Image: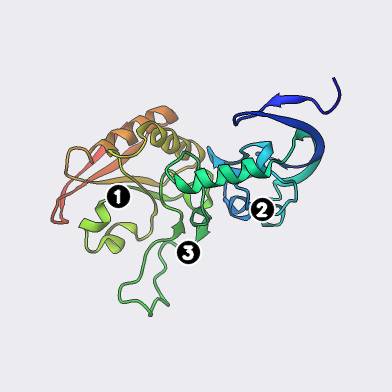
C-alpha cells in the first residue's frame, strides 16, 4: 500500500493520510493555560485533564497560528504522516461545538487563564463602589487547570455556584486572600469534579481548604465531592465546611478531617 493509505479517524468517515505539517504538543511543558485554544480558529486544540490536546488531525491545518501564543514553548510544527486537513469536516465540527457549549471539552476565549490581581490586593480599585477580591480566571471547576500557578501554596475555596448570590459581602468575607473554584453538585458532572479536585490536590501543596455551600440538601453534596476527591488524592487533609443559610448567614461551620 502506498503512502496515501486510508485510516479511520475520530469522526465518521475515512480520511486520506498524507505527509504534511501538523502541530506537536509537548505535554511535559504544557501548563494548561489555554492560550493556544483561543488562537486556533479551527478548534483543533482543547484543554483535557489540564493539558492541551490535538482533538483530531483533520481539524489542524498545520499553519501554526497557535505557536506564538504558547508561553511555555510547548507547541512546535513537525512534518509527518497525518490525516489530511478537512475544511468541510472542520466547519461541521465548529458548528456543532458552538451550538452545544455543554459538550465536554468545549473551549471559548473566556477560559484563558489570567491573573487579575494579587490575592489580597484591593488598592487602586476606585472605579467601583465595592472592589473585587477575585485574584484569577477562570474559576469554574470544569475549566481550571490543576497545574495553574494560582493554586500553588494557596488557601483554596471550593464554592457552590449559588453562594455568591446569597452572601452580600461574599468577596470580603470569603474570597479575600483565596484562590477559588466554583461548581454545582446537583447539575454538573460529579465524577468529573471529583477527579479534577483530586488532581488539584495531588499537584499542589495547599495551605488550607474551605468548602462553602448552601443549606439546601442538594448543595450539601459538594462536601461529599471534596471528601471523595481527598480520598482519591491519597492525602490526609483537614478542611473547613461552611453552610450558608438562604438569608446569607453562616448557619454552620465545622472542621472535617479526612
What sort of colour scheme is used for the picture?
rainbow
Task: Tell me which residue sits at (75%, 31%) in the image.
Answer: 16
Circle nearer the N terminus (3, 2): 2
Is residue 22 or residue 119 the one in the foreground?
22
Please identify the quarter of the rendering in which residue 184 is found.
top left
Front of the two marks 3 and 2: 2
Q: Which residue is mark 2?
A: 70
- How many circles with numbers are drawn on the protein? 3
Residue 162 x, y percent position in the rendering: 25, 51
In the rendered image, residue 106, in percent from the top left (x then y), is placed at: 50, 44
Residue at the spot of label 1: 161
Helix, strand or loop at label 1? It is loop
- Sequence-first disc among 1 and 2: 2
User: Can residue 152 be seen from the camera position used here?
Assistant: no
The Cα atoms of the two marked residues, 3 and 2, are separated by 19 Å
Residue under the point 20% across and 56% down: 166
Residue 20 falls left or right of residue 232:
right
Label 3, label 1: how far apart the Cα atoms are: 20 Å
Q: Which residue is mark 3?
A: 116
- Position of residue 191 relative to residue 85, above or below, is above
Amino acid at each position: 500500500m502506498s503512502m496515501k493509505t486510508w485510516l479511520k479517524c475520530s469522526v465518521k468517515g475515512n480520511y486520506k493520510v498524507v505527509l504534511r505539517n501538523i502541530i506537536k504538543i509537548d505535554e511535559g511543558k504544557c501548563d494548561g493555560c489555554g492560550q493556544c485554544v483561543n488562537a486556533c480558529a479551527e478548534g483543533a486544540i482543547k484543554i483535557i485533564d489540564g493539558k492541551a490536546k490535538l482533538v483530531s488531525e483533520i481539524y489542524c491545518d498545520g499553519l501554526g497560528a497557535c505557536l506564538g501564543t504558547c508561553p511555555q514553548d510547548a507547541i512546535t510544527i513537525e512534518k509527518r504522516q497525518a490525516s489530511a486537513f478537512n475544511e468541510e469536516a472542520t466547519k461541521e465540527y465548529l458548528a456543532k461545538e458552538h451550538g452545544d457549549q455543554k459538550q465536554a471539552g468545549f473551549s471559548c476565549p473566556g477560559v484563558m487563564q489570567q491573573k487579575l490581581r494579587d490575592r489580597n490586593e484591593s488598592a487602586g480599585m476606585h472605579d467601583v463602589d465595592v472592589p473585587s477580591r477575585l485574584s484569577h480566571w477562570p474559576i469554574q471547576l470544569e475549566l481550571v487547570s490543576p497545574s495553574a500557578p494560582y493554586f500553588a501554596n494557596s488557601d483554596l475555596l471550593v464554592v457552590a455556584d449559588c453562594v455568591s448570590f446569597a452572601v452580600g459581602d461574599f468577596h470580603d468575607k470569603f474570597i479575600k486572600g483565596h484562590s477559588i473554584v466554583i461548581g454545582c453538585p446537583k447539575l454538573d458532572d460529579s465524577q468529573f469534579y471529583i477527579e479534577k479536585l483530586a488532581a488539584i490536590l495531588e499537584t499542589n501543596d495547599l495551605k488550607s481548604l474551605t468548602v462553602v455551600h448552601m443549606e439546601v440538601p442538594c448543595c450539601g453534596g459538594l462536601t461529599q465531592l471534596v471528601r471523595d476527591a481527598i480520598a482519591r488524592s491519597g492525602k490526609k487533609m483537614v478542611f473547613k465546611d461552611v453552610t450558608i443559610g438562604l438569608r446569607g448567614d453562616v448557619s454552620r461551620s465545622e472542621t472535617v478531617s479526612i
